[in-house]
Image (cartoon, helix red, strand yellow):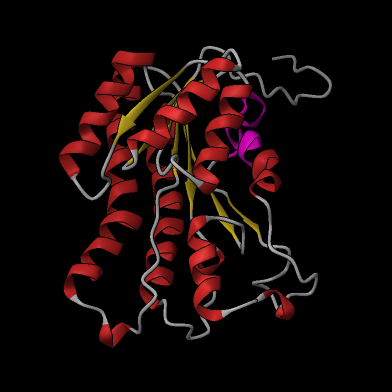
Amino acid sequence: MTYPLPNASIDLTGQTALVTGASSGLGRRFALVLATCGAKVAVTGRRLDRLETLAAEIKAAGGEAAPLALDVTDADQLIDVVERAQKALGLVTILINNAGIPDAQRAHKMPLELIDRVFDTNLRAPYILSCEVARRLIAAGSPGRMVNIASMAAFQYRGEGAALYSITKAGVVRLTEALAVEWARYNINVNCIAPGAFSSEMMDGMLARVGDITQGFPRKRIGDPAQMDATLLHLVSPAADFVTGAVIKIDDVQGGR
């Protein structure tokens, strides 16, 4: 095979992407970036009004999008949303498992309901959704790309009161590595981004609880979601077809102190 020089295309024309947690923050940005590069995008989340606004923005810019309400703690909805996305936009070939929640409590003080919700949102949902998308890709004989959003908390925990968040995000890293092996033979690439402190609703909530955390960072700043664009596009682009099972940390050295 002859490759172009450089082999760096980010043209996603003809692809259909499904993004979870797209009503705000990182997920919203991911959806806009994918649409701008030509993908049709199913934007999912609990807040349908926000998803409809996002879909309208994508369409106004010349893209194609479908807003689909989704509670990722409901397994039936996870399976159904893939079917709905396919009917609206075509076979899902790009999956961005972005939805996540923090626990923000000491482990021994967490009620069972919160324990279940954190596990279901952060780890169970990406697994179920990945399997459902993979099942359809394999049946269609189509390659695919999956990007899971973990966290630097997967690699370090300093006792801030978010132990289960750290545990589930470590699970997302291992999920990525294991499913990459499982599906390599089907040309389904599974990769992971582990962000540090980036601006989002979740981060805003943490800052409201603990105050300014940036003074402990080498460059005393929080990331903007736009600073993840290049990494996301690399992992879903045609040029990265040899990249699978990778976990890319984007944390401005905040988690590596």
Query: Percent position (x, y) of residue 105?
Result: 35, 80
Q: Is residue 37 magenta?
A: no
Query: Percent position (x, y) of residue 168?
Result: 37, 64
Q: Residue furthest right?
A: 5
Q: Identify the residue shown where x is 57% and y is 39%.
A: 29
| Quadrant in which the N terminus is drawn | top right
* 136 to 105, vertically: above or below: above
Residue nearer the viewer, 123 or 138 = 123
Q: Identify the residue shown where x is 27% and y is 46%.
A: 72
From which residue to which does the magenta span run?
232-243
Q: Quadrant of residue 63?
A: top right
* Residue 191 shows in the view: no
Query: Percent position (x, y) of residue 16?
Result: 45, 20
Query: Percent position (x, y) of residue 85?
Result: 33, 22
Q: Identify the residue shown where x is 54% and y is 41%.
A: 244
Residue nearer the viewer, 198 or 244 = 198
* Residue 116 shows in the view: yes
* 230 to 14, vertically: above or below: below
- Secondary structure mostly seen in the magenta stretch: helix
* 162 to 25, vertically: above or below: below
Residue nearer the viewer, 4 or 56 = 56
Left or right of 215, for residue 16: left
